[in-house]
Image (tube, rainbow, N blue to C red):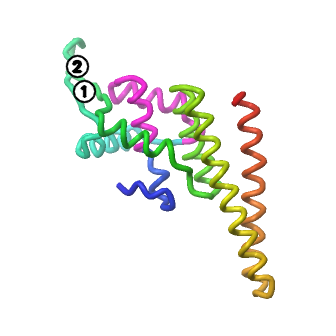
């Protein structure tokens, strides 16, 4: 699993699973219900995919599964995050999401809501890191647009779209801050 924020893999659901498990250990079935209840507009993870994610996280040492002896009937596995998993989650929380609409909608909002469950200061920091990344990206695209003033229509229109997307994302970030009282 690559932790590079520029790649689509930054949208992989391992992080939301780590985030929920870092809040409280859980069985897979209960975790799936919680995921659906709290993140249904961001993530659509079938139960069988969730168990695959849990297995990958366990193999990598990010979580540990323990047999739950308190339940009558078939023994269930209760998952909890390891120190390594918490460190991985912390690194992911503290870096900005890629500058695409999908990444902002899925990865950034996941980061923000997981951070809000932890503490408001972390959420404010995540919001500011993302804003700064958007500002930097916007400045870079505006400079590219100035440098390519004589470029083909295709190049100019492509840059114009990226600039407008980032400007819209910046305005949306203001709305996020206001709505969440950050």
**Above or below — where is 181 with respect to 132?**
above
Q: Which residue is mark 2?
A: 68
Nearest to the observer: residue 19 or residue 132: 132
Magenta-span inclusion, residue 20: yes
**Above or below — where is 38 with respect to 11?**
above
Q: Residue at x 45, y 42 (%)?
A: 45
- Per the rendered image, the range of residues in magenta is 14-42
Real-space Cα distance between discs 2 and 1? 6 Å
- 160 horizontally vs 38: left or right: right
Q: Which residue is mark 1?
A: 77
- 129 horizontally vs 27: left or right: right
Image quadrant where residue 17 sits = top left
Q: Where does the image place residue 169, in percent across and percent down from the top left? A: 72, 52
Name the image quarter holding the N terminus: bottom left
Q: Residue at x 25, y 27 (%)?
A: 77
Q: Where does the image place residue 57, in percent across and percent down from the top left? A: 30, 42
Closer to the chain start, of discs 2 and 1, is: 2
Q: Residue at x 71, y 38 (%)?
A: 176
Helix, strand or loop status at disc 2: strand
Q: Disc count in the image? A: 2
Name the image quarter holding the C terminus: top right
Magenta-span inclusion, residue 95: no
Nearest to the observer: residue 167 or residue 53: 167
The reply to whether the C-beta atoms of the residues labelled 2 and 1 are less than 8 Å apart is yes
Q: Where does the image place residue 157, in percent across and percent down from the top left? A: 77, 75
Q: Residue at x 39, y 29 (%)?
A: 22
**Main structural element of the magenta stretch: helix, strand or loop?**
helix
**Above or below — where is 171 with respect to 112?**
below
Helix, strand or loop status at disc 1: strand
């Amino acid at each position: 699993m690559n932790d590079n924020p520029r790649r689509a893999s930054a949208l992989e659901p391992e992080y939301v699973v780590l985030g929920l498990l870092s809040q409280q250990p859980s069985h897979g079935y209960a975790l799936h219900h919680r995921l659906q209840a709290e993140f249904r507009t961001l993530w659509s993870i079938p139960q069988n995919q969730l168990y695959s994610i849990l297995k990958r996280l366990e193999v990598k040492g990010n979580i540990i599964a323990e047999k739950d002896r308190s339940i009558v009937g078939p023994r269930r596995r209760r998952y909890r995050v390891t120190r390594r998993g918490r460190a991985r989650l912390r690194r992911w929380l503290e870096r900005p999401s890629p500058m695409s609409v999908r990444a902002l909608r899925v990865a950034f909002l996941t980061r923000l809501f997981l951070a809000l469950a932890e503490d408001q200061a972390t959420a404010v920091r995540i919001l500011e890191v993302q804003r700064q990344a958007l500002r930097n990206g916007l400045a870079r695209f505006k400079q590219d647009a100035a440098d390519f003033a004589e470029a083909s229509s295709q190049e100019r229109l492509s840059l114009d779209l990226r600039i407008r997307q980032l400007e819209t994302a910046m305005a949306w970030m203001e709305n996020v801050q206001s709505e969440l009282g950050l």
